[in-house]
Image (cartoon, helix red, strand yellow):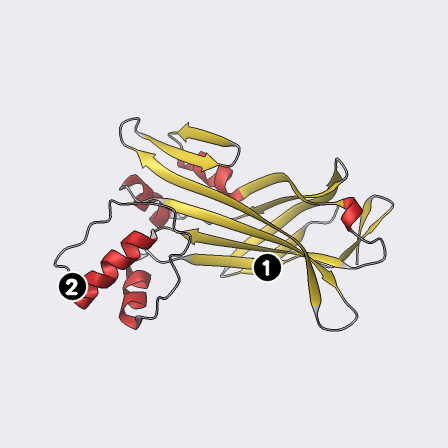
Amino acid sequence: MIASHLLGAGRKVLVDSVHIEDSHLALDFSIEGIIDDKIAEGLQKGRTLTLEYNIQLWEKSSGLISHLKAERLIRMKVNFDFWENKFVIYRPEEKRLTSSIETVRERCSEIHDFNVISLDKLKSDSDYYINIELALKPLSVENYEEIKNWLSGEVKDISLKKMSNPEEQEKGFKNRILRVFMAITGFGDRVISGKTENFKIHDNEIVWH
């Protein structure tokens, strides 16, 4: 197995393993430093963090165009439960409470044995690569709109207590002052992306080249 480094936004994506698992192409990967001290402090003050991994498998063609063979999403959410005095991590397979920010970092940044696609959908003579994108979303769409209205003078005060799924929080945002405000306060999204080297599937083995 050859580990691949994916570079993006000053952070490093490490693909620890691309392997065959139960007749599927599977993946282990991690991203270093995605929950920094500023985000950790925000969680402890009541902010909710949403993480969305987008894993794409591409098949290279003879030309410049690649074809998307598979796309999988992993969504997580982290907040702080003041009653329990613990962080709460929501992943597709579990809900976990922990008092350790290091556990939050580990559970949110390390993905193991993630099935990407069944082998019977892949060709033995084709070149493939995997692209991974992570979007960190520390603020919900309702909060974005509330701050936008506050900046425009439509409301006199804002509340950052309402947290929900930020599925469309970037859509329609073109207010330059708002973007500057988000950057200064650390409320805006962060995106990290990168891709592996090319590989083939041959006799149920990964061949890198």
Mark 2 closeness class: few <14, some 14–19, many ≥20 residues within 10 Å: few
Tell me the distance, in whole angstroms, between the alpha carbons under discs 2 and 1: 40 Å
Q: Is residue 49 above or below residue 170?
A: above
Who's the residue at 30% across and 26% down the image?
Answer: 84
User: How far across and how far down the image is residue 92, in percent?
Assistant: 51, 36
Q: How many marks?
A: 2
User: How far across and how far down the image is residue 71, in percent?
Assistant: 62, 52
- Mark number for residue 194? 1
Q: In the image, 149: left or right of 140?
A: left
Q: In the image, 16: left or right of 146?
A: right
For residue 182, what is the image quadrant? bottom left
User: How far across and how far down the image is residue 161, in percent?
Assistant: 24, 44
Quadrant of the image containing the C terminus: bottom right
User: How far across and how far down the image is residue 136, in percent?
Assistant: 43, 52
User: What's the residue type where badge 1 is placed?
Assistant: Gly
Q: Nearer the viewer, residue 82 or 161?
A: 161
Quadrant of the image containing the N terminus: top right
Q: In the image, 42: left or right of 135?
A: left
User: What's the residue type where badge 2 is placed?
Assistant: Glu
Q: Which residue is mark 2?
A: 154
User: Tag 1's secondary structure?
Assistant: strand
Who's the residue at 73% across and 49% down the image?
Answer: 2
